Image (cartoon, helix red, strand yellow):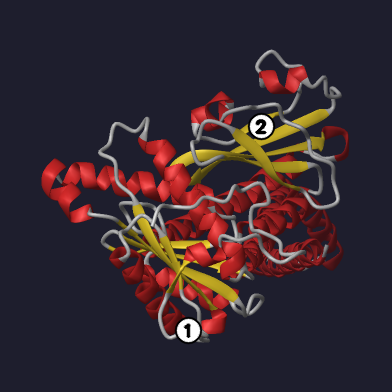
Amino acid sequence: MLHRQAGAKSILVRVGGALIGLSVAFVGARWTLMALTGEGVAHGRIAQELGLFLALSTVALTATSTLPIRNDLLQIQRLVENTEHELRERNRGERFLRKVQSAFDMVEREEELFEIAGLAMRDASDGPGEFLVADSSNAHIQRVATANGHDAPGCGVATPRSCPAVRNGQTMKFVATNDLAACPRLRERNLAENQAAICVPVNVLGTPSAVLHAVRNTAEATGDQLEVAATALEGVAVRFGARLGMMRAMSQSQLQADTDPLTGLLNRRAMENRVRDMRVDHPSFAVAMADLDHFKDLNDTFGHDTGDRALRLFSRILRAAVRDADIVARHGGEEFVIVLPGADVTRSAPVLHRLQRRLSEALADAQLPTFTVSLGLVDTTGGDDLSELIQLADRALMQAKADGRDRIVIWDSSLAEPTSSAELDAEPEPGTELIAASAERHHPAH
């Protein structure tokens, strides 16, 4: 409005100045002409001619200059206003996406990322929205986040490749859900005719693995508003995919750093870190050392490939024989460490017996040479330091080897020498809870 008023005032001033100049020039010319021709200076006549001249000049200036200039100024004004509006919207969008990026950067877990994504979708579109992300196999897709405060739109896509936006690799907008070219998933849901949909493919680690799906009521939003919402949602989707990919890459790198590549169990350093964290909630625990018997002979006789298969088989059985909260690690070579939080040797011995029994059962069908495992067991009554407990468990393991292998020896802190697990094969005291209530007691031959 101020630009328009200033432009109109400027035009009037310039036209007024032009008319005054023309008037002075006209009067001077007529005065001079009358003087040169000897005619008498007729002031009344000059005034009449001047009035007629000004009227004709005003019409001519208006037609040839004033109106074109005014129209040009209005066009310039509209262009400036549109440019200012676009800049304001762009700045607003950039500020919003900077906030989204900052919020994504602060999260450490995927669950937190999904929660922030829901808030971002709400602010970007102010309507129902959802993130659908593929699983690790990239064969199935599931909803991980919805626009906070809104119900999920409920897209029925089952795999990433079954989404047209993912297949095409670009954002798709469907203004009418019953249109011939609308996504089949929209028609399946029988949405209202005034529902528009926006689908944005999301790349995770360079692979189209997710989609952001949002719906808007076209009766409540103009076409420009839909475009603004689509742009904002695209920005959210790009940042979501980048952050999710980074988190998964870091998680994979950490997993590789913590995992023994052959067996998939924790390595020694990762095991020590897990135990340190575990002791906050479980200050008492049991530690067992396991060693495959005559493993060097197995390697030398049947080859290292067979030895690797034996290690992998034992690792699978070991992982299945313990609780989810128990910590198992490859300590090196054919040695393994088992940490059982909240347990003592009495509660842990049946678990190790079960491990031996399951190994024997698995070898019957594994097409591998038969091998056995010896184990040494201790709990925190024998010491407080993990390295010390591992040393005691290792001494008990050596005793098991010396006693003939394929057995468990428990270190008793009240004795000077390790004692065989046969002394603990008696029934536990009433009320003692075994780690696996259904485990059968197994007594290896001594």
Residue 186 at x, y = what percent?
Answer: 73, 23
Quarter assignment of residue 404: bottom left
Mark 2 secondary-structure assignment? strand
The residue beneath circle 2 is 173
**Pointer 1 or 2: first along the chain:** 2
Amino acid found under the numbered disc labelled 2: Lys
Q: Nearer the viewer, residue 254 or 184?
A: 254
Q: Is residue 421 above or below residue 49?
A: below
Residue 325 at x, y = what percent?
Answer: 60, 61
Residue in the picture at 30% in, 52% down: 262
Q: Quadrant of the N terminus?
A: bottom right
Dot 1 surroundings within 10 Å: few (below 14), some, or many (20 or more)?
A: few
Residue in the picture at 59% in, 55% down: 323
Which is closer to the viewer, label 1 or label 2? 1
Dot 2 surroundings within 10 Å: few (below 14), some, or many (20 or more)?
A: many
Residue 371 at x, y = what percent?
Answer: 30, 46
Q: Quadrant of the C terminus?
A: bottom left
Residue 72 at x, y = what percent?
Answer: 66, 51
**Is 419 left, or right, of 282 in this rendering?**
left
The residue beneath circle 1 is 415
Amino acid found under the numbered disc labelled 1: Leu
